[in-house]
Amino acid sequence: MFVVIFGRPGCPFCVRAQTLAERLESANVIEGHRYVDIWAEGISKADLEKTIGKPVSTVPQVFIDQTHVGGFTEFDQYVRDNALLA
């Protein structure tokens, strides 16, 4: 599995999503992760909406293997539901 997180500077939930991805990577649960700073990359929420296919009001937006999971809360729940961390 590979995780991609779209976030922005100063976003506490973006930091939490990145920390969770790092924990998954350290535990060899995922192959790796990439954090994309939407401000630095010039990505707008409208751009994310086109990719996701529904309105985006918050970041982070997390993808696992190119499948949209949601924000941090959904990402955390996915990890719990699938018992990815002990």
Image (cartoon, rainbow, N blue to C red):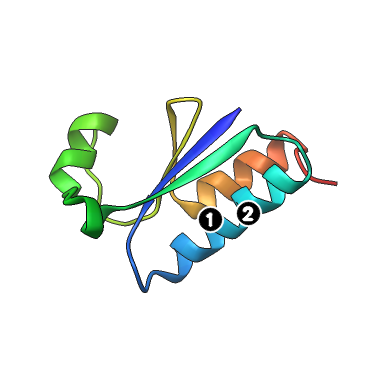
Looking at the picture, which amino acid does disc 1 mark?
Ala
Q: Position of residue 66 (x, y in %)?
A: 43, 26
Q: Position of residue 71 (x, y in %)?
A: 44, 49
* Dot label at residue 46: none
In the rendered view, does 19 fall on the left or right side of 72?
A: right
According to the picture, the residue beneath numbered tag 2 turns out to be 20
Q: Position of residue 41 (x, y in %)?
A: 22, 50
Q: Residue at image x 14%, y 43%?
A: 46
Q: Nearer the viewer, residue 49 or 2?
A: 2
Q: Pointers 2 and 1 in contact (CB under 8 A)?
A: yes
How far separated are the C-alphas under marks 2 and 1? 5 Å
Q: How many marks?
A: 2
In the rendered image, the vertical position of residue 51 relative to residue 55, given as above or below: above
In the rendered image, the quadrant that contains the N terminus is top right
* Dot label at residue 17: 1
Tell me the SS state at disc 1.
helix
Q: Quadrant of residue 27?
A: top right
Residue sitting at the far bottom: 10
